[in-house]
Image (cartoon, helix red, strand yellow):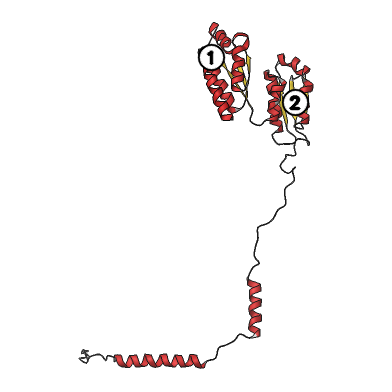
Amino acid sequence: MVVVQSTPSTSKPHRKNRRSLSKKKKARVDQDHDMSNASPAIKPTADDEEILIDVDGADVAPPTEAPVFGPAPASAGQTLKSETRRVAIPPHRMTPLKKEWINIFGPLTEILGLQVRMNVQRKCVEVRTSKHSKELGALQKGADFVKAFALGFDVNDALALLRLDDLYLDSFEIKDVKTLHGDHLSRAIGRIAGQDGKTKFTIENASRTRIILADTKIHILGSFQNIKIARDAIVSLILGSPPGKVYAGLRTVASRMKQRAL
């Protein structure tokens, strides 16, 4: 058996001379510089230009722009199917409804373009949209107009619901504010109405609203802010405030409303 032992070499590794390396780099740089000067500039041929043009036309997509749509017709937003609304009329308002029927169905058909009929058997007024309806909220306006008359408002006062957009109806009962019975309930109603209706008229003129006092139910017609003013005054009277104190508060509110109007 032969055993071979490797002996470490004692000779030092050969190191390259820095001067020889720098000379070789310099020679390579000079050679590259000479080759760049010797080679002429390559000009694109006609065939290359044609190829480039074809490639550009095939790859590059045409610029996209936002689509332009024409104006939509006026009848596009209207619903095609007809809608019907039925408003119940109390028995004690059927006679006034028959007397004022000409003044009721006239504005509904002329201003809103609705179809109206009075159903005597069911004691209601039926309102339906037609192709002549001028706006989407016409049916709701017509129903509110008929409902205001059914609650006891005058036709001229209820007609403002059709001509103005910021008018609303608000209804509540005395028991919603405070539970009263017997003579206490009668005195509360008397405080709201006043002698010969003086208190009610004062609240209407100060708050620019219309108020219907039907037994224990109270209906108010007006704008949102004016309804709040009238309701606060009526609530104060129900809770027992004297009319003089309510008048003072209404004077302050009325003066503020005049300043805002100016």
Q: Dividing the image into 4 quarters, which one contains the C terminus?
A: top right
**Percent of width and height locating residue 107:** 76, 27
**Percent of width and height locating residue 165:** 66, 32
Q: Nearer the viewer, residue 107 or 18?
A: 107
Asked which quadrant contains residue 198, the reply is: top right
Of helix, strand and loop, which one carries label 1? Answer: helix
Q: Is residue 63 above or below residue 260?
A: below
Q: Which residue lies most toward the front here?
A: 262
- Answer left or right for 37 relative to 222: left
State which tag comes first along the sequence, 1 or 2: 2
Q: Nearer the viewer, residue 2 or 55?
A: 55
Q: Residues within 10 Å of mark 2 (few under 14, many from 20)?
A: some
* Residue denoted by label 2: 126
At label 2, the amino acid type is: Glu
- Answer left or right for 30 relative to 48: left
Q: Is residue 54 above or below residue 183?
A: below
Q: Residue 216, can we see it?
A: no
Q: Residue at x 58, y 9 (%)?
A: 190
Q: Nearer the viewer, residue 27 or 83?
A: 27
* Residue denoted by label 1: 237
Q: Residue at x 70, y 20 (%)?
A: 149
Asked which quadrant contains residue 231, the reply is: top right
**Percent of width and height locating residue 87:** 71, 24
At label 1, the amino acid type is: Leu
Task: For the residues labelled 1 and 2, say whether their Cβ atoms are less than 8 Å apart.
Answer: no
Q: Residues within 10 Å of mark 1 (few under 14, many from 20)?
A: many
Q: Nearer the viewer, mark 1 or mark 2?
A: 1
Q: Dividing the image into 4 quarters, which one contains the N terminus?
A: bottom left
Q: Which mark is residue 202?
A: none
